[in-house]
Image (cartoon, helix red, strand yellow):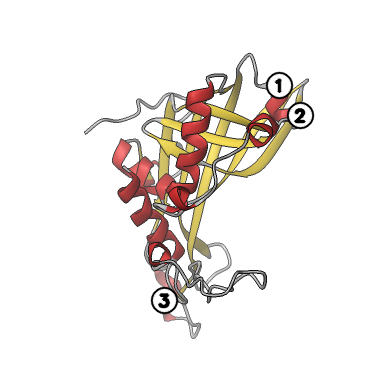
């Protein structure tokens, strides 16, 4: 099993037993999400930008407007930290101190650079659509020249990464288990709602079979993870 070698920058220090550095753990958490927070420093000032992302092997991609300050500054390469988080539950203990969250998270480090190769840019922008909705790109019109020009694509090869998770119930002090206080876990998950057709949709166009996984009540993380497997 391939792993990322942790350093002082990426090693989980607090509750280190929750940390994992193998590709399988890191990629699984990345593939179950679609929003990342990109942290970087420009002219001595810290910034964090939320954005959608996708993964091709050990490379993360994201895109944005060509006018973006962050994207313009990444032409020569910019050190960044990318984080993705999933919140799975509120953990209610018998003291405020021991209240917690059940979560799955990834922190990845690398150098972000603008993708200059037109073929890679076009291929990966198409992959972004199919990463979320497998097979959908084939039914869409191709990106035109102006759209590609207005879009900047960023790539970051993952140099280091750490996954960190918490599961299970509260961990109270021994003497507190005798208290008359409810404790436990309130599960949380992102659930897909009922799809809503565009009012301008031409008559006779039904909901595509390729989107069957996106149905009312489906778990979003499970759907995205399944779609990532189809893409690979």
Residue at image position (48%, 24%) is: 119
Residue lying at the far top in this picture: please name it. Answer: 76
Residue 67: quarter of image: top right
Q: Are marks 1 and 3 in contact (CB under 8 Å)?
A: no
Can residue 68 be seen at all in this image of the molecule?
Answer: yes
- Where disc 2 sits, the SS reads helix
Residue 100 image offset from top left, x and y in percent? 51, 62
Residue lying at the far left in this picture: please name it. Answer: 1
Q: In the figure, is residue 215 to the left or right of 144?
A: left
The span from disc 1 to disc 3 (Cα, nearest Å) is: 54 Å
Residue lying at the far bottom in this picture: please name it. Answer: 180
The span from disc 2 to disc 3 (Cα, nearest Å) is: 53 Å
The numbered disc on residue 69 is: 2
| Circle 1 residue | 73
9 vs 119, nearest the viewer: 119
| Circle 3 residue | 177
């Amino acid at each position: 099993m391939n792993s990322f070698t942790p350093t002082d920058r990426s090693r989980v220090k607090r509750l280190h037993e929750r940390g994992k550095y193998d590709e399988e753990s890191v990629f699984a958490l990345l593939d179950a999400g679609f929003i990342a927070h990109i942290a970087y420093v420009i002219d001595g000032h810290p910034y964090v930008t939320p954005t959608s992302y996708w993964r091709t092997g050990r490379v993360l991609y994201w895109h944005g407007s060509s006018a973006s300050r962050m994207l313009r500054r990444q032409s020569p390469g910019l050190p960044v930290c990318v984080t993705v988080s999933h919140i799975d539950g509120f953990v209610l203990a018998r003291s405020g101190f021991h209240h917690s969250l059940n979560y799955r998270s990834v922190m990845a480090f690398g150098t972000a650079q603008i993708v200059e190769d037109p073929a890679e840019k076009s291929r990966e922008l198409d992959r972004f659509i199919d990463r979320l909705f497998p097979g959908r790109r084939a039914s869409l019109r191709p990106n035109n020249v102006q759209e590609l020009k207005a879009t900047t694509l960023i790539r970051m090869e993952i140099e280091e990464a750490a996954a960190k998770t918490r599961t299970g119930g509260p961990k109270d002090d021994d003497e507190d288990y005798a208290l008359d206080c409810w404790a436990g876990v309130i599960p949380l998950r992102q659930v897909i709602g009922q799809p809503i057709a565009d009012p301008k949709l031409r008559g006779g166009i039904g909901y595509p079979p390729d989107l069957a996984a996106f149905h009312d009540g489906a778990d979003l993380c499970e759907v995205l993870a399944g779609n990532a497997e189809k893409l690979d």
